[in-house]
């Protein structure tokens, strides 16, 4: 007996990041983490910055960092429209650390900025932290250490 699968795709304004048949996915929503399996009830949700953990049809794992977006679960398909999304294998730790340091510095110096600018800085920091978590999770799954 074979396990059930469901079609999944994640798309950003720039590209299709991932499109494949999968066994399950865990996504960070504004209501908490949700794990979706085939035959899940229909669902629409807002994503928060975080890590997608995807179990592919061959039982290997794919890790993707997202900075927000929308999730739609249909009867036979899962679609994520993400603001940004990066596969963990594509992430560069040095670039992430530099961007995170810049975002943290901007947040420290944000005393005299308006709420919109502060929200932009905070969102950038959240994005970089999600990228770091995705890279760390991918390393753990693959058995790598720092």
Image (tube, rainbow, N blue to C red):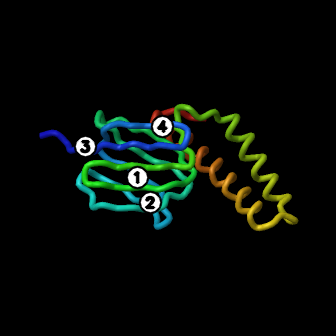
- State whether residue 106 is above or below residue 16: below
Which of disc 2 and disc 3 is earlier in sequence?
A: 3
The numbered mark, 4 or 3, whose residue comes first in the sequence reads: 3
The foreground one among 68 and 53 is 68
N-terminal of the pair, mark 4 or mark 2, is 4
**Which residue extends farthest front?**
13
Callouts 3 and 1 close, C-beta under 8 Å:
no
Residue, disc 2: 33
Q: CA distance from mark 3 to mark 1?
A: 14 Å
Q: Residue at x 16, y 39 (%)?
A: 2
- Label 1 sits on residue: 26
Mark 3 lies on residue: 5
What residue is drawn where x is 63% and y is 50%?
127
Circles 1 and 2, Cβ within 8 Å, touching? The answer is yes
Q: Is residue 109 found left or right of 40 in the rendered image?
A: right
Foreground mark, 4 or 1, reads: 4
Q: Quadrant of residue 107?
A: bottom right
**Closer to the observer: label 4 or label 2?**
4
Pair 3/1: label in front: 3
SS label for mark 4: strand
């Amino acid at each position: 007996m074979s396990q059930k699968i469901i079609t999944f795709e994640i798309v950003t304004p720039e590209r299709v990041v991932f499109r494949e048949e999968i066994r399950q996915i865990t996504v960070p929503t504004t209501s908490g983490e949700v794990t979706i399996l085939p035959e899940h009830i229909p669902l629409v949700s807002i994503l928060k910055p975080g890590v997608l953990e995807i179990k592919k049809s061959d039982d290997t794992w794919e890790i993707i960092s997202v900075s927000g977006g929308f999730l739609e679960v249909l009867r036979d398909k899962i679609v994520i429209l993400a603001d940004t999304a990066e596969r963990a294998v594509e992430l560069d730790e040095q670039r992430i650390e530099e961007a995170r340091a810049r975002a943290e510095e901007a947040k420290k110096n944000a005393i005299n900025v308006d709420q919109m600018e502060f929200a932009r800085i905070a969102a950038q920091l959240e994005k970089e932290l999600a990228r770091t978590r995705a890279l760390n999770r991918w390393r753990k799954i693959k058995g790598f250490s720092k």
